[in-house]
Image (spheres, grey):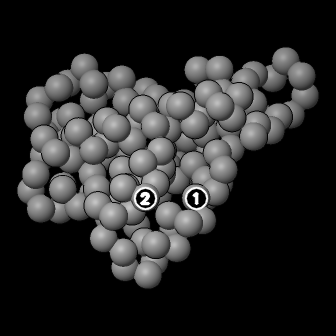
Amino acid sequence: MSSSLGMPGTGPAETLLPAEDDVLEAFQRGADPDDIAREHPASPFAWALLADLAWANGEEVPSYAFARVGYHRGLDALRKAGWKGAGRIPYSHQGNHGFLRCLVALQRAAKAIGEEAEVERIGQFLDEADPTAKVAILNI
């Protein structure tokens, strides 16, 4: 689902991904992130959970891999929602949380493994999507 930012000609529309209520409910009741990803493999939020768990366990490469999967699942969802490769993806919309969390996790892990071009590219993507997202995510 996309919504307009305002008057025609003001730039690309915001993209709002569908809410991931089932995934959030499973997470809130303490389900294992592996099980959540198995039950919801298309969910960026599920992959973000795995990326964050791997990171917390000091597993930089697995964190990168999980975040990369979530990033691509999120791109698929964005395109399905009408995203054309540019425009705002506001963190204020709950459905966008998983994708944006994957971006932050991907940037963090890319930095840890020395993939500087990826760090820069993801930083630019985050700034375009929602410049407030990274701070909001890191303060969770």
Instruction: Please name the residue shown 90% across and 28% down the image.
Output: 7
Residue type indicated by callout 1: Glu
Percent x, y for residue 85? 59, 20
Q: Secondary structure at mark 2?
A: helix
Q: Which mark is residue 20?
A: 1
Which residue is at the front of the view, 136 or 110?
110
* Sequence-first tag of 1 and 2: 1
Residue type indicated by callout 2: Glu
User: Taking 117 as reference, is 133 above or below it?
Assistant: below
Q: Secondary structure at mark 1?
A: loop
Q: Which residue, as the protein is rendered here, is positioned at the far right?
A: 7
Q: Is residue 102 left or right of residue 60?
A: right
Tell me the residue that label 2 is attached to. 39
Percent x, y for residue 63? 21, 47
Q: Is residue 121 left or right of residue 2?
A: left
Q: Which residue, as the protein is rendered here, is positioned at the far front?
A: 39
Instruction: Please name the residue shown 18% across and 55% down the image.
Output: 55
Q: Is residue 5 left or right of residue 17?
A: right
Question: Can residue 126 be seen at all in this image of the molecule?
Answer: no
